[in-house]
Image (spheres, rainbow, N blue to C red):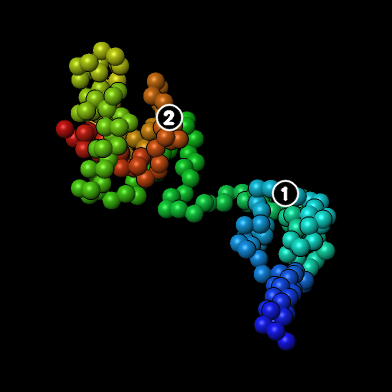
Amino acid sequence: MTVKNYLHTAFAFFSGLAMVACGASGNDQGLEYAPNMYHSVPYEPLSQIKDKDAGNAAELLRSNDDGHGEYYNSNPLNTSEMTMRVPPANTVPRGKYIPYRIPKDSLALAARIVENPIEDSEIVLKQGKELYERFCDHCHGAKGLGAEEGSVGEVFAGVPSYTSAALKDVSGGHIFHVITNGKGRMGAHGSQISVEDRWKIVRYVQTLQKQ
């Protein structure tokens, strides 16, 4: 047998081996290039394909042995055949803080029972000051004096000072509730400022109450 024949035989052998290796059958899926790009291992939560034959035409791309097509991705254990489920009532999302549920018209309740979970420290006060300057001082003034602070008062007449008789003794829960839900002409900031940042602002505002 000549060298040329050996090469032809070797080529045919390895070509056949490659073709066999790329076949898909049952648990033996052969070799695929970047399979995760087109084979989704988990259920897709945001797309629901209920047609169990979807993808059957592409037999070489089948990745299961349950009789379903490649693209079927609904969850048969869910009565609505969807993968994403509505969480149970009162479910608390992962994170440090539970959702703030006290209604807007319950300011007195919030002032009495809501307490600041953020420690009073120099770092917190520094961060609170930065947040106050970003979200608050354009109406309340850099010193928290409201309408008493020059040009601020000209534009926002009637904004009270934190040192006024009405505000100097209000609690942290009161301040947090107003930041969250708004009060009077002040709009709600619960959607713009995170829970933690609102509490940091509360800490800083309480220093302005004591000026």
Is 107 or 34 nearer to us in this picture? 34
Instruction: Give the residue at x 57% y 49%.
Output: 90
In-image side of 148 versus 156 (left or right) = left
Question: Distance from label 2 to label 1 (Cα)?
Answer: 37 Å
Residue 196, x across and y down, in percent: 37, 45
Residue 8, placed above or below residue 185: below
Nearest to viewer (mark 2 / mark 1): 1
Residue 27, placed above or below residue 209: below
Instruction: Give the residue at x 66% y 57%.
Output: 38
Is 200 or 64 nearer to us in this picture? 64
Q: Amino acid at mark 2?
A: Ala
Q: Which residue is mark 1?
A: 48
Q: Earlier in the sequence, mark 2 or mark 1?
A: 1
Instruction: Give the residue at x 72% y 49%.
Output: 48
In-image side of 85 versus 26 (left or right) = left
Describe the element under mark 2 as helix, strand or loop.
Answer: loop
Is 163 or 73 nearer to us in this picture? 73
Q: Which residue is mark 2?
A: 188
